[in-house]
Amino acid sequence: FPFQTITGNFANVIHGLNANHLTDQVIQRSKRMILDTLGVGLLGTNTEVCHKVTQYSKIYSSDISSTIWGHLDFRLPPLYAAFVNGVAVHSMDFDDTWHPATHPSGAVLPAVIALSEAFPQKKKISGLDLLLAFNVGIEVQGRLLRFSSEARNIPKRY
């Protein structure tokens, strides 16, 4: 379609992707990005802002829960677990970046992990499926950034 929407473009790009589309180079870089993000996120669990959002989020509960990094005895609904873990990553501001300035893994990885933990035991996803979801999230974020008129000016503002 010549007048395809941005959402339609995203859907066409990601529809039908599977783990076979991940090259060895993408898998290796993704693993490095994930390891970096987990390390920064674990360090970030000690920040004041992370403590505040953790305390705030304790009011939420659900039958479905996901891990709060650095807290073996505390779980939250996936939405709030992703929020708290994302804040932990971003509170350090040392996670990966690209041009124009953004931190892709800190937004994507906490959501992917929280959702993967929420799947019933019978439907647990594989490591490759997690890598695929992570890369789709990174790709969508990159495309949104590319289409953003706000993002085009970031390098000039700093």
Image (tube, helix red, strand yellow):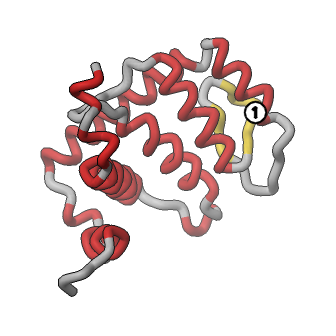
Residue in the foreground of this view, choosing between 1 and 58: 1
Q: Is residue 79 left or right of residue 86?
A: right
Quarter that holds the N terminus: bottom left
- Residue 74 position, x and y percent, is 75, 33
Residue shown at 19% from the left, 47% from the top? 26
Q: Is residue 147 left or right of residue 111?
A: left
Residue in the foreground of this view, choosing between 7 and 66: 7
Residue in the foreground of this view, choosing between 2 and 85: 2
Residue shown at 31% from the left, 49% from the top? 148
- Residue 10 position, x and y percent, is 31, 68
Would you place residue 5 above or below residue 113 in this image? below
Would you place residue 124 above or below residue 109 in this image? below
Quarter that holds the C terminus: top left
Which of the 4 quarters of the picture holds residue 34? top left
Residue type, label 1: Phe
Asked whether residue 92 appears in the rendered view, the answer is: yes
Residue where numbered disc 1 is placed: 74
Which of the 4 quarters of the picture holds residue 33? top left
Asked whether residue 131 appears in the rendered view, the answer is: no
